[in-house]
Structures are given as structure tokens and as C-alpha cells.
Image: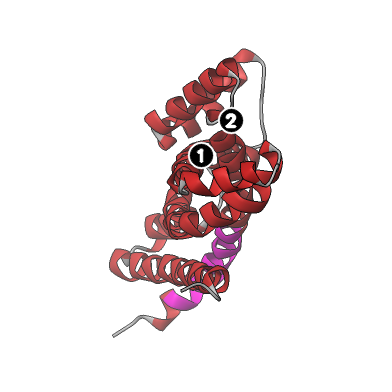
Amino acid sequence: MIPIDVVSQVLPLLQEGFIVTIQLVIIAGILSFVMSFVGGLARLSRFAPLRWVSGFLIEFFRGTSLLVQLFWFYYALPLLGVTLPTGLVGIVALTLNYGSYGSEIVRSSILAVPKGQAEAGIALNMTRFQRMKSIILPQAFRIMLPSFGNLMIELLKGTALVSLITIQDMTFYITQARNTIGHDTLLFSMLLVAYFIIGYVITLVFRWLERKFSAGRV
């Protein structure tokens, strides 16, 4: 039987952590989305130094562990004289890590648009900016959406690591409750369900976006 008294103790804490997790996903998700476009477009720039710098930064944050990045910003950065609020550390690390992955999504999606589309814009005497804005990006965005949906799910799962730097998300509260009242199976089952609910909502949102941006296409 499910111990109702344990559920009643843990549920309010889980709800508090749920709100924090949602905030992390939304804020870091939006910032990652912005970084994805900035980084992806920078890697396609005609200016070689911009391509090199953006490429190095993207590969660095893609090639290093999110956990190590969190620890570096939380423990090592203050030793250099820069101390960030704990919540900001989580957002910055999540944004840099998943924004770097998103940059590759943007870059590859733009390159996947047939070259004939850009050539048609040139024939219409459109500038590079006009071609990118009116022809290439709208088509590339439809290609990006499924990958961005998967990226947001990965970001959601990545938020569980922020509990290790004392951000009070769902994992933090469940771990604390486990240490005080036990019932590991019940507590982590509740945590699994909570993450699944958020992940499923994200999936539904991106499926809706895919249908919306694919409307009218054969």
C-alpha cells in the first residue's frame, strides 16, 4: 500500500521543486534558443575570425561535461574573483551547454535548405540578409523543430544536476526527503512521474509547433 502520510509530507516539497524546475527549463530554454541562432549563424559567417571563435566556444561547451561546467562556475569561478548567484550559475551552465548543441542544429538545418532557394533569392536581387530572413530561415526552422524538441527534453533532464550545487529543484527536495524519511522507491517514483509530466508537455508543445509551421505544405 502507498503510505499516504509520506506522500502528504513530500508532495508540497515536490511542488516547490517542480516550480523551480519549470523556471529553469523556460529561462534556460529561451536563452539556449537565442544562443543557438547566434552561434549557428556565426559559424556560417563570411568572416573567418568569427567562425573560428564561435566554433571553438561551441565545441568547448559541447565537448565538456555539464556537471563539470556547473562545478566550475560554482566552485572555481569565485576563486577568480567572480561569484554568481546559485540560480544564475545553473542557468548559465545549462544555456552554454545546450545552446552549443542547438547551434549545430541551426547550422546543419540552414545548410540542409536546397541551394536553389538562395539562388532564386539572388535572381530576385535580394540581399544576403533578405534571403536569410525571407527564404532560408523559414524553411530551416521547420527542419530544426524536431531536433529542438529533443534538445529541450535533454535540457529538462539536465536540470536534475543543478541539485548538486544546492539549487532547490525537484531532485534536490526528493534527495533531502530520502535522507530523512526513507521510502526510496516511492519518492523516486514520484520524481520520475513529475519529470515525465514536464517532458510530455514539452513534447506536445513541439508537436503543435511542427503542425503549425507545416500547415499548407504538401
Kindly give the residue lying farthest to the front in the view shown.
Answer: 123
Please name the residue shown 48% across and 29% down the image.
58
Q: Is residue 12 visible?
A: yes
Residue matched to label 1: 103
Identify whether 27 is placed above or below 45. Answer: below
- Please identify the dominant SS of the magenta region: helix
Q: Comparing marks 2 and 1, which lies closer to the viewer?
A: 2
Q: Magenta span has 115?
A: no
Is label 2 in a helix, a strand or a loop?
Answer: helix
Residue 25, relative to residue 1: is it above or below?
above
Residue at 58% across / 48% down in the picture? 120
Magenta-highlighted residues: 7-22
From the image, tell me which residue sits under label 2: 42
Task: Locate residue 3, reporting x and y percent.
Answer: 36, 80
Callout 1 environment at 10 Å: few (<14), some (14 to 19), or many (20+)? Answer: many
Q: Position of residue 118 (x, y in %)?
A: 56, 44
- Sequence-wise, the earlier of marks 2 and 1 is 2
The answer to whether marks 2 and 1 mark residues whose Cβ atoms lie closer than 8 Å is: yes
In the picture shown, does residue 5 fall above or below 23? Answer: below
* Front position in the image: 192 or 98: 98
Query: Disc 1 marks which amino acid?
Result: Ser
